[in-house]
Image: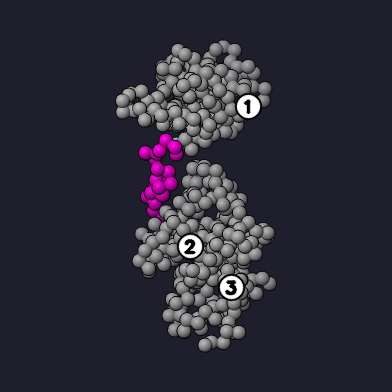
Amino acid sequence: MTDQTEFPDNDDIHAAELVLGLASDDDRTAGRRRMATDPTFAAHVVFWQERLAAMADSIDPVAPPARLKQRMLAQVFPAKRVSILERVWLWQGISVAALLFAGYLGVQLLTINTQPNQQPAVLAAQLVSDTGPLQVLAVIEPVSHEIALRRIAGEARADRSLELWAILPGQAPISLGVLPDSETARILVPAALRSQAAQFTLAITDEPLGGSPTGGPTGDVLAAGPMTTL
Amino acid sequence: MDRNEIENLIARVALRDRAAFEQLYDRVSAKLFGVCLRVLNKRAAAEDAMQDTFVKIWKNADRYNANGLSPMTWLITIARNTAIDRLRARKKGHQDIDTPGFELVAPGPNPEQAAVASSEALRLSGCLDTLEQDRGNAIRGAYLDGETYADLADRFGVPLNTMRTWLRRGLIALRECMSQ
């Protein structure tokens, strides 16, 4: 038996061993759990993590191969075959409308075998700009034919209005209306355009207060995006 | 590295900002890959550890603020622990990539501890150098190479308990030196 009284043992040492990875598996599990509940012990761990991480300064950076980034991104953002629910989650800015519709779609999916062509698509667009801050999410609700809009970032310029346009291939932009100052808005899609909604590109322009005086856009395009099927 | 820049990127990643995530990767991946390579010594394994590391960063970015660490320490800690988990799993013959790979800290009353400058590296290495050489090397080996008490006892040719006592004394001396 070694001389136990000489054997250094306290919370600070346990914290250091945890950070160094010297703790046994059991101690490690217990230590991690304790950190989540015991701020004093957690402070010891943070002390050691912060101090010992300085050792990494002696490690030279090594550029990883480019394919690693692609592989990692493919894992974090699976591009294809994203479930409807995940997509709905991505569009959480309009979550209520989208979730309601997901429920509706669920009902539709149940009947899909008998009516394969009756499944309506949820259309959504993310209106953004490379140069400005304005970001707006839009979802077209197929039952009410309303566009539910949520402004995520940016706003109208001082004493100016934001106007929403639907653009169809080869046609002049069609005004859908002036957006209110609020973050959310609902705008009815004119009946004549409803069947072509999937081809829309939505755009928001900077216009004089109250909207374009000419019927066509007159100001800068502040954000735009094509409709995609959610 | 600019602490504010990295911190901002992590905050945006917590909001699920993919562009920020890619920027963060571009900014820190070389450093973190260096860390993974140092621990694992094999490129293929280090690449796998990097992939896990960034998945964890993506999933846990919203917890960054609560843990009181400086941003690079947080990132390096995730990379190092992920690499060490892989090293241990390799030795044991299985892998457990589901554990967070880093310690989640309760929100604590010690923000000053996070305010550590990079001069800390000099201080640490100065303090390690004041220890008896073997003890300093043992602490370096544990942190940088993921060596366990058993590995270290082997390397230094001493019994396990002796190693433990040595290293613990070294840690106490290190704490004193760095707290001065």
Label 3 crowd bin: few (<14), some (14–19), many (20+), radius 10 Å: many
Q: Are marks 1 and 3 on the same chain?
A: yes
Q: Name the side, left or right, on which B4 lies relative to B29.
A: right
Q: Residue at x 48, y 24 (%)?
A: A141
Bounds of the magenta span? A64-86
Q: Position of residue A149 (x, y in %)?
A: 54, 27
Q: Position of residue A102 (x, y in %)?
A: 45, 32
Image vertical order of residue B99 relative to residue A184, above or below: below
Q: Find out whether residue B180 is within the magenta segment.
A: no
Q: Quadrant of the C terminus of chain B?
A: bottom right
The earlier-in-sequence mark between 1 and 3 is 3
- Residue name at image x 41 percent, y 18 percent: A196
Q: Amino acid at mark 2?
A: Asn
Q: Which residue is mark 2?
A: B81
Q: Is any atom of residue A93 visible in this view?
A: yes
Looking at this view, is B53 or B44 the one in front? B53
Distance from label 1 to label 3 (Cα)? 55 Å
State yes or no: residue A83 in magenta: yes
Same chain for labels 1 and 2? Say yes or no: no
Q: Dot 2 falls on which chain?
A: B
Q: On the image, numbered disc 3 is attached to which residue?
A: A13
The quadrant holding residue B44 is: bottom left
Secondary structure under tag 2 reads helix
**Where residue B70 sits in the image (x, y, percent)?**
60, 57
* Image quadrant containing the N terminus of chain B: bottom right
Residue annotated with mark 1: A182
Find the distance from the CA under tag 1 to the CA under tag 2.
46 Å
> Is residue B143 among what the camera can see?
no
Q: Nearer the viewer, residue A151 or A69?
A: A151
